[in-house]
Image (cartoon, rainbow, N blue to C red):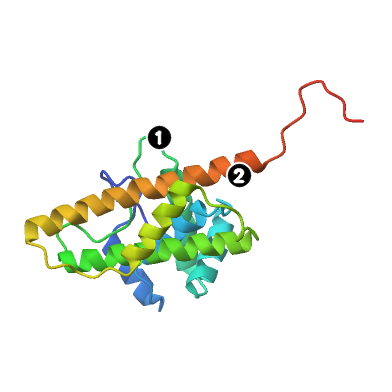
Amino acid sequence: MFDPAPGETGDLPVFDEVADQLVEQGVSQSPSELHGCLAGLLAGGADPSPEAGLAGVGSALGFDPHGELADGLQRFYVSTAQLLTDEALRFHPLLPDDDSDLGERTVAIADWCRGFLSGFAQARVSSRSTDAAVATDSAEALKDFAAIAQAGVGDDSDDEAEQAYADLVEYLRFAAMNIILDSLQQAAEARPASPPAGSTVH
Protein backbone atom coordinates (compact mmCIF):
# COMPACT_ATOMS: atom_id res chain seq x y z
CA MET A 1 0.00 0.00 0.00
CA PHE A 2 1.24 3.50 -0.91
CA ASP A 3 4.22 1.97 -2.68
CA PRO A 4 5.87 4.52 -4.97
CA ALA A 5 5.39 4.33 -8.71
CA PRO A 6 8.42 4.91 -10.94
CA GLY A 7 8.43 7.88 -13.26
CA GLU A 8 8.67 11.64 -13.34
CA THR A 9 6.43 12.07 -10.29
CA GLY A 10 9.19 10.71 -8.09
CA ASP A 11 8.01 8.76 -5.07
CA LEU A 12 4.25 9.16 -5.47
CA PRO A 13 2.13 6.02 -5.15
CA VAL A 14 -0.36 4.98 -7.83
CA PHE A 15 -3.57 7.02 -7.50
CA ASP A 16 -6.00 4.17 -8.19
CA GLU A 17 -4.27 1.82 -5.75
CA VAL A 18 -4.50 4.41 -2.99
CA ALA A 19 -8.16 5.02 -3.84
CA ASP A 20 -8.93 1.30 -3.56
CA GLN A 21 -7.20 1.05 -0.19
CA LEU A 22 -9.04 4.07 1.18
CA VAL A 23 -12.39 2.62 0.13
CA GLU A 24 -11.51 -0.71 1.75
CA GLN A 25 -10.68 1.12 4.99
CA GLY A 26 -13.94 3.11 4.87
CA VAL A 27 -12.24 6.48 4.33
CA SER A 28 -14.36 8.91 2.32
CA GLN A 29 -11.57 11.31 1.32
CA SER A 30 -9.92 10.98 -2.08
CA PRO A 31 -6.21 10.22 -2.55
CA SER A 32 -5.73 13.80 -3.74
CA GLU A 33 -7.30 15.29 -0.61
CA LEU A 34 -5.19 12.97 1.53
CA HIS A 35 -1.97 13.97 -0.22
CA GLY A 36 -2.90 17.64 -0.10
CA CYS A 37 -3.43 17.32 3.64
CA LEU A 38 -0.01 15.72 4.16
CA ALA A 39 1.63 18.50 2.16
CA GLY A 40 -0.36 21.16 4.01
CA LEU A 41 0.68 19.78 7.39
CA LEU A 42 4.33 20.07 6.42
CA ALA A 43 3.87 23.51 4.88
CA GLY A 44 2.18 24.66 8.07
CA GLY A 45 5.20 23.68 10.14
CA ALA A 46 4.22 20.23 11.41
CA ASP A 47 6.92 17.89 12.66
CA PRO A 48 8.12 15.74 9.73
CA SER A 49 8.17 12.57 11.84
CA PRO A 50 5.87 9.74 10.68
CA GLU A 51 3.96 9.78 13.97
CA ALA A 52 3.23 13.50 13.67
CA GLY A 53 1.96 13.03 10.14
CA LEU A 54 -0.35 10.22 11.18
CA ALA A 55 -1.81 12.21 14.06
CA GLY A 56 -2.11 15.36 11.98
CA VAL A 57 -3.93 13.85 9.02
CA GLY A 58 -6.33 12.04 11.33
CA SER A 59 -7.20 15.26 13.14
CA ALA A 60 -7.39 17.38 9.99
CA LEU A 61 -9.59 15.01 8.00
CA GLY A 62 -11.54 13.50 10.86
CA PHE A 63 -10.72 9.80 10.71
CA ASP A 64 -8.67 7.35 12.75
CA PRO A 65 -6.07 5.63 10.56
CA HIS A 66 -4.97 2.24 11.82
CA GLY A 67 -3.36 -0.98 10.67
CA GLU A 68 -2.07 -1.11 7.12
CA LEU A 69 -3.54 2.30 6.34
CA ALA A 70 -1.62 3.90 9.21
CA ASP A 71 1.64 2.31 8.11
CA GLY A 72 1.13 3.46 4.53
CA LEU A 73 0.22 7.00 5.56
CA GLN A 74 3.37 7.33 7.64
CA ARG A 75 5.55 6.28 4.70
CA PHE A 76 3.62 8.60 2.40
CA TYR A 77 4.13 11.52 4.82
CA VAL A 78 7.89 10.97 4.95
CA SER A 79 8.19 10.76 1.16
CA THR A 80 6.05 13.90 0.78
CA ALA A 81 8.35 15.76 3.18
CA GLN A 82 11.37 14.70 1.16
CA LEU A 83 9.84 15.72 -2.16
CA LEU A 84 8.63 19.12 -0.95
CA THR A 85 12.22 20.14 -0.23
CA ASP A 86 13.82 18.20 -3.08
CA GLU A 87 16.37 20.29 -4.98
CA ALA A 88 15.42 18.45 -8.18
CA LEU A 89 11.86 19.85 -7.83
CA ARG A 90 10.25 16.42 -8.17
CA PHE A 91 7.23 17.25 -6.02
CA HIS A 92 3.86 16.69 -7.72
CA PRO A 93 0.32 16.66 -6.35
CA LEU A 94 -1.17 13.15 -6.34
CA LEU A 95 -3.81 13.30 -9.08
CA PRO A 96 -5.54 10.82 -11.41
CA ASP A 97 -3.60 9.66 -14.45
CA ASP A 98 -3.61 12.03 -17.43
CA ASP A 99 -5.69 9.48 -19.34
CA SER A 100 -8.54 10.00 -16.87
CA ASP A 101 -11.50 12.21 -17.70
CA LEU A 102 -10.64 15.91 -17.38
CA GLY A 103 -13.63 16.48 -15.12
CA GLU A 104 -12.34 13.83 -12.71
CA ARG A 105 -8.89 15.41 -12.70
CA THR A 106 -10.35 18.88 -12.13
CA VAL A 107 -12.31 17.63 -9.12
CA ALA A 108 -9.12 16.01 -7.81
CA ILE A 109 -7.28 19.34 -8.00
CA ALA A 110 -10.02 20.93 -5.91
CA ASP A 111 -9.78 18.02 -3.46
CA TRP A 112 -6.01 18.44 -3.23
CA CYS A 113 -6.30 22.15 -2.46
CA ARG A 114 -8.99 21.51 0.14
CA GLY A 115 -6.78 18.91 1.81
CA PHE A 116 -3.78 21.24 1.75
CA LEU A 117 -5.73 23.98 3.50
CA SER A 118 -7.03 21.52 6.11
CA GLY A 119 -3.53 20.25 6.81
CA PHE A 120 -2.02 23.74 6.94
CA ALA A 121 -4.66 24.91 9.41
CA GLN A 122 -4.26 21.79 11.56
CA ALA A 123 -0.49 22.26 11.77
CA ARG A 124 -0.88 25.84 12.96
CA VAL A 125 -3.52 24.88 15.51
CA SER A 126 -1.33 22.08 16.85
CA SER A 127 1.67 24.39 17.17
CA ARG A 128 -0.47 27.18 18.66
CA SER A 129 0.68 29.50 15.89
CA THR A 130 -2.67 30.46 14.38
CA ASP A 131 -1.91 34.13 15.00
CA ALA A 132 1.58 33.96 13.52
CA ALA A 133 2.14 35.94 10.34
CA VAL A 134 2.21 34.11 7.02
CA ALA A 135 4.69 35.27 4.38
CA THR A 136 3.03 37.49 1.78
CA ASP A 137 3.63 35.16 -1.16
CA SER A 138 2.40 32.18 0.86
CA ALA A 139 -0.72 34.05 1.94
CA GLU A 140 -1.54 34.83 -1.70
CA ALA A 141 -0.99 31.20 -2.68
CA LEU A 142 -3.27 30.00 0.12
CA LYS A 143 -5.99 32.35 -1.14
CA ASP A 144 -5.55 30.87 -4.60
CA PHE A 145 -5.81 27.36 -3.15
CA ALA A 146 -9.06 28.32 -1.43
CA ALA A 147 -10.47 29.60 -4.73
CA ILE A 148 -9.35 26.48 -6.61
CA ALA A 149 -10.93 24.27 -3.93
CA GLN A 150 -14.31 25.79 -4.88
CA ALA A 151 -13.78 25.62 -8.63
CA GLY A 152 -15.87 23.51 -10.97
CA VAL A 153 -15.37 22.12 -14.46
CA GLY A 154 -15.25 24.90 -17.07
CA ASP A 155 -16.70 25.12 -20.57
CA ASP A 156 -13.43 25.62 -22.46
CA SER A 157 -12.58 23.57 -25.52
CA ASP A 158 -10.69 20.33 -24.94
CA ASP A 159 -7.31 21.77 -25.89
CA GLU A 160 -7.80 24.94 -23.86
CA ALA A 161 -9.07 23.01 -20.86
CA GLU A 162 -6.16 20.56 -20.97
CA GLN A 163 -3.67 23.41 -21.14
CA ALA A 164 -5.39 25.22 -18.28
CA TYR A 165 -5.27 22.01 -16.23
CA ALA A 166 -1.56 21.49 -16.93
CA ASP A 167 -0.80 25.10 -16.01
CA LEU A 168 -2.75 24.74 -12.77
CA VAL A 169 -0.89 21.58 -11.77
CA GLU A 170 2.43 23.35 -12.34
CA TYR A 171 1.25 26.29 -10.25
CA LEU A 172 0.25 24.00 -7.38
CA ARG A 173 3.60 22.23 -7.52
CA PHE A 174 5.68 25.35 -7.15
CA ALA A 175 3.30 27.16 -4.81
CA ALA A 176 3.39 24.24 -2.36
CA MET A 177 7.18 24.09 -2.45
CA ASN A 178 7.44 27.85 -1.96
CA ILE A 179 5.04 27.78 1.00
CA ILE A 180 7.09 25.16 2.81
CA LEU A 181 10.31 27.07 2.09
CA ASP A 182 8.73 30.20 3.57
CA SER A 183 7.65 28.18 6.59
CA LEU A 184 11.12 26.72 7.10
CA GLN A 185 12.70 30.16 6.78
CA GLN A 186 10.32 31.67 9.33
CA ALA A 187 11.01 28.80 11.73
CA ALA A 188 14.76 29.32 11.36
CA GLU A 189 14.42 33.06 11.99
CA ALA A 190 12.31 32.41 15.08
CA ARG A 191 14.92 30.18 16.70
CA PRO A 192 17.24 31.95 19.16
CA ALA A 193 20.74 32.47 17.85
CA SER A 194 23.37 30.08 19.18
CA PRO A 195 26.13 31.70 21.26
CA PRO A 196 29.51 32.00 19.52
CA ALA A 197 31.81 29.02 19.90
CA GLY A 198 33.90 29.23 23.04
CA SER A 199 31.69 31.82 24.72
CA THR A 200 30.60 31.39 28.32
CA VAL A 201 27.10 32.10 29.57
CA HIS A 202 27.09 33.78 33.00
Query: Which dot, 1 or 2, sits closer to the camera?
Result: 2
- Camera-side residue: 150 or 116? 150
Q: Quadrant of residue 95?
A: bottom left
Q: Earlier in the sequence, mark 1 or mark 2?
A: 1
The local secondary structure at tag 2 comes to helix
Query: What separation in Å lies between label 1 and label 2 (alpha carbons)?
Result: 20 Å
At x 41% / y 65%, what residue is drawn?
A: 115
Q: Locate residue 93, reporting x and y percent.
A: 33, 54
Q: Residue furthest right?
A: 202
Q: Amino acid at mark 1?
A: Glu
The local secondary structure at tag 1 comes to loop
Q: Mark 2 — residue?
A: 187
Label 2: how many Cα within 10 Å (few below 14, some 14–19, many 20+): few
- Camera-side residue: 161 or 105? 161
Residue 120 visible? The answer is yes
The quadrant the C terminus occupies is: top right
Label 1: how many Cα within 10 Å (few below 14, some 14–19, many 20+): few
Residue 72 visible? The answer is no
Q: Locate residue 163, reporting x and y percent.
A: 15, 52
The quadrant the N terminus occupies is: bottom left
Q: Locate residue 22, reporting x and y percent.
A: 37, 71
At x 60% / y 64%, what residue is drawn?
A: 125
Q: Mark 1 — residue?
A: 87
Q: Is residue 41 left or right of residue 26?
A: right
Q: Locate residue 100, reporting x and y percent.
A: 16, 63
